[in-house]
Image: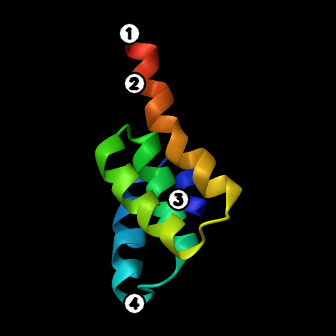
Amino acid sequence: VALMRQNRLAEAVKIFAGNDKTFVQNAENLNNWGVALLEMRRFKQAVSVLNRALKLKPNNEMMRYNLAIPQLADKDKN
């Protein structure tokens, strides 16, 4: 998360992806990874990762909100 605050998104994504191998069922890691991908505008990958997070914590409103961001971005294009 500190790397994200420093706008070092590519580094953050690598760390979150690496953490996924260690913390497979960690919704918070998946959410952070998804947010970093969103900030890089890698929406397709972000949706995939955020969906995994939401399966682990289906009632988490922040994860639901993060998952809506790519849909809103697509509407802005039109």
Sequence-wise, which precedes: disc 4 or disc 3? 3
- Residue drawn at x 39%, y 24% is 74
Sequence-wise, which precedes: disc 2 or disc 3? 3
Looking at the image, how many numbered discs can be counted on the residues?
4
Q: What SS does tag 2 mark?
A: helix
Q: Which mark is residue 74?
A: 2
Tell me how far mark 4 sits from mark 3, CA to CA: 19 Å
Quarter of the picture containing the N terminus is bottom right
What x and y, as percent, mark residue 16?
42, 70
Sequence-wise, which precedes: disc 1 or disc 4? 4
Tell me how far mark 2 sits from mark 3, CA to CA: 27 Å
Q: Is residue 7 something that shows in the picture? A: yes
- Residue drawn at x 35%, y 41% is 43
**Comparing marks 2 and 3, which lies closer to the viewer?**
2
- Residue drawn at x 46%, y 41% is 39
Mark 3, residue position: 3
Q: Amino acid at mark 1?
A: Asn
Q: Amino acid at mark 4?
A: Thr
Q: Amino acid at mark 3?
A: Leu
Tell me how far mark 2 sits from mark 4, CA to CA: 33 Å
What x and y, as percent, mark residue 41?
37, 37
Q: Amino acid at mark 2?
A: Asp
What x and y, as percent, mark residue 33?
45, 62
Q: Are marks 1 and 2 in contact (CB under 8 Å)?
A: yes
**How crowded is the residue under tag 3: few (<14 C-alpha within 10 Å), some, or many (20+)?**
some
Coloring applied to the structure: rainbow
**Comparing marks 4 and 3, which lies closer to the viewer?**
4
Mark 1, residue position: 78
In the image, residue 67 sits, relative to residue 69, either above or below, namely below
Residue 57 horizontal side relative to residue 20, left or right: right
Relative depth, front residue between 29 and 1: 29
Mark 4, residue position: 22
